[in-house]
Structure formats: structure tokens, C-alpha cells
Amino acid sequence: MAKQELKRDLKDRHVQLIAIGGTIGTGLFLGSGRAIQLAGPSIIFAYLIVGIACFFVMRALGELLLSNAGYQSFTDFAEEYIGPWAGYVTGWTYWFCWIMTAMADIIAVGVYVQYWFDIPQWIPALVCLILLLGLNLLTVKLFGELEFWFAIIKVITILALIVIGIILLFIGFQTNSGTVTVKNLWGHGGLFPNGISGFFLSFQMVVFAFVGVELVGVSAAETSNPRKNIPSAINKIPLRILFFYVGALFILLCINPWTELNAANSPFVKTFSLVGIPIAAGIINFVVLTSAASACNSGLFSTSRILFNLSGHNQGPAKFAKLNKNHVPSNALFISTLVLSAGALLSKLIPEQAFGIVTTISAICFIWVWSIILICHLRYRKSRPDLHEKSIFKAPFTPFINYVVLALFALILIIMLFAEATRVALLLTPVWFILLFILYTFKKKKGGSLTTQNIHSS
């Protein structure tokens, strides 16, 4: 039977907005409050540092994907340049961390809807999940359209914040917290009010804020013109980081002294309330609701595609490699939705601290995926200098920058080990990798084929 292929139905505007959606999520809208409490105004530098690191990861990813038209995801080149075990472990790890991220987001949808309607949170969570499943089953173009409009809402919100903030700075607006001024950045204990330790402790939530930036790579197999669309989306990441993260946080901290922001609430709600918008809480609640739905939508898309890719390489059940009449991996979508719904039910029963554990484990797993991309790029440059030489999208400052970013990721993991809030999650995460290596070894002994299916033929 001929191998089924995903349909290349994502246009340039879809890829551009998927890239934007991947760099704006609940980590910014909700997690930034906690990160600010840890680092104070120096959080701006933390977002800048991790954002730059992610850009270099994405440049390495872009060069690798475009070096071979047969690559459908980073698991393909992980398998080729490191080994079958790397493709297996990285693929299933990517599925796992998106499942965990989406679990948190689908529960968040239920919580946000309770702001308007007094109903059990599992009802809107389940309705949202079924709705997203139905839309994702139709065509990949619908996924692109959903992410397009979800991202538009995020962009408009942040743009409104920045424009309003600039006006307030210009007129020296008075709030209950004092005057809106740039001096608020250093006037309450300096840029590093909690010292260098507080600055480093914020990196876990900052890393979580950037999860999903690699979605451009996952969508490569369904992009109509990857040689044009992928470089275009990746090259705009630095401007998006400066605008959406650094710009938004700069304005937030000029309007609100960092000491006035609550780690449990969104700093965006606080800011819009201060400027006198009467329905500010409702507006931002709608934004974070769509942001959570967007993250869950991205989770369904990425987990189904990674299952499809794994199964196509005999690293997962063969039934996940089947496409429906719309060229969508429906079986993979169903199983991801099933796992998510079970996770939503379990999440309802566990304490609130579980969200912190889930986000930490997710961040650790994403660090693994990003590190594998950088290591693959190093091996690609060494083993295939011919491909690197003729590349239309060479990653800059390599191989030096690869080692610098890998060292940064190692430092973040060490920080997580010493931080009480993240230590438990860090110590739990190796259980997942041990389980994967056991399953890989068992499958290999049974004679399962774990080799690349001629992806290097082009």
C-alpha cells in the first residue's frame, strides 16, 4: 500500500500566525506574574536571553528541515544524525510534553468559563476539547484558520497594552500605584531586587513561555511552500520576541511597580484595570480563554502529527499512520484527545500545585527537544558539509552558538535542581526517559524495525 502523506495546505499567513501563536501563550499572560515576583524588572533580560536562544534553535531547525525535502519533523533528522533511539525518544517526549501542556490548558478553559457561568469546570473543558477535535478532523487548513484568529486576538491585546502604555508614559498618568514612569523599572529595589538568584529562578517559567516556538517545524510537512514560508517565519522571531515579550513586559513594569503585581493573577488584568477600563477583567479573561484554547488546539495538532510521524517509522502503532479522506491523521487525533480528556478529569482531582509540576516537566522535556535539534545540527555540519555549503538558510554563528545555547539549557536544569518549586518535577522527569529507553530496548529485541524509511533519498 502506498504511503499516505499529509496534505500541504498551510499557506504563508497560516505559518506566520502559527509562529506568532507559538511565541505567545499562557506563559506570558499568566506565568509572567509569577516570574516577575521572582526576578523583578530583570525578568525582561530573562525573556530576552531565552528568546535569543530559541531563535538560534529555530535557525538550526530551519536549516535541517530544508536540507531534505523528505523530512516531516525533527524526529526524522534526529533518527538520521544521532540514531533510531533518538528519533524514538525525542518523538515520544515531544508528544508527552505537549500532552502535559494541553492538559493544563484544557482545565484552564473550564476555569476561565466559570468567570461568566456557574457550571462545573469539566463541562466547558470537555466541550472545548470535542469542538477542537471536530475542527481538526476536517482539514489542516481549518487548524491554520483557528490559529490565525487565535493569534490575532493575542496580537491585538498586546498591541493595545503597548499603545495605551506609551500614551500613559507620555502624559505621566497617575494610578493608585503612583505615576506611570520608566523609573518604576529601578525605583523599587533596582533591576535585580531579589538578587541574581531570583533572576535565575525565573528561567523555568520563561522557558515554559516559549514552548511551541518549534511548531513551525512540526507544520513543515503541511506547508505549501516550505522553502519560502519556514525561513520567513523563523527570521521574524527576534522582532516578535522584542515586541510581544520585551515590549509588553517593559510597558507592564512602567505602569505597575513590580511589587504591586500578584503572582497568582495575570499582570495584564491588573494593568487594564489601572487605566480605567471598566470591563478590563472580562476582556482579559476572554483573551486568556482563547489563549488556552489556542494552546490546546496546538497540542492536538502537534501530538497527532508526531504520532503519525512515529508510526510511519514503525516507532508507534501502525493505525496512527492512517489518514482520513481529508488527509488528517484522525486515529492519532482521537488517541491524543482521549488521553487529554482523561488528564483533564485527573487534573480536577489534584491540588493546584500540580500545575507548577506539569509546567516544569513540560519545560524540561522541551529543553530535551531543543537540545536534540542543536546536537543534530552539529552532526549535520560535520557529516554533511556539502549540504551545509549549498544551504539556502544557513544557521548563523555555528557551531559556536550551538554550544553556548546547550550550556544555557544545562544551567537552567541545574537551577531547577536547586529551586524548591521545581526540584520535585526535575527528579520525576527521568522516570519518563527511563520508561522510553526500556520500551525502545524491548521493541528492538522483538525485532521491530526502528530504522529511517529512506528519508535521505532526496
Image (cartoon, rainbow, N blue to C red):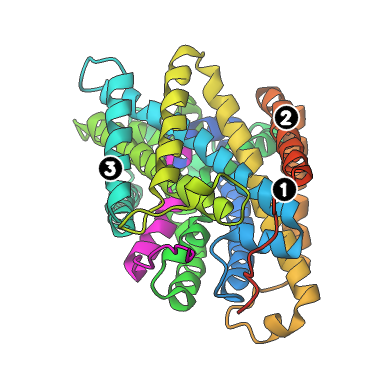
Which numbered disc flags the more N-terminal residue, 1 or 2? 1
Which numbered disc flags the more N-terminal residue, 1 or 3? 3
Residue occupied by mark 2: 431
Decide if residue 95 is on the left or right side of residue 332: right
Instruction: Give the alpha-carbon distance from disc 2 to disc 3, as whole Å.
Output: 34 Å
Please report the bounds of the magenta region as a residue range: 1-27
Callout in the foreground (2, 3)? 3
Residue occupied by mark 1: 409
* Residue in the image at 42% along x and 31% along y: 338
- The image shows residue 244, relative to residue 360, as above or below, that is below
* Residue in the image at 72% along x and 48% along y: 409
Callout in the foreground (1, 3)? 3
Q: Residues within 10 Å of mark 3 (few under 14, many from 20)?
A: some
Indicate the quadrant where residue 281 lies: top left
Indicate the quadrant where residue 178 lies: top left
Q: Nearer the viewer, residue 199 or 147?
A: 147
Residue 7 part of the magenta segment: yes
Instruction: Give the alpha-carbon distance from disc 1 to disc 2, as whole Å.
Output: 20 Å
**Label 3 secondary element:** helix
Question: Marks 3 and 2: in contact by CB < 8 Å?
Answer: no
**Label 2 secondary element:** helix
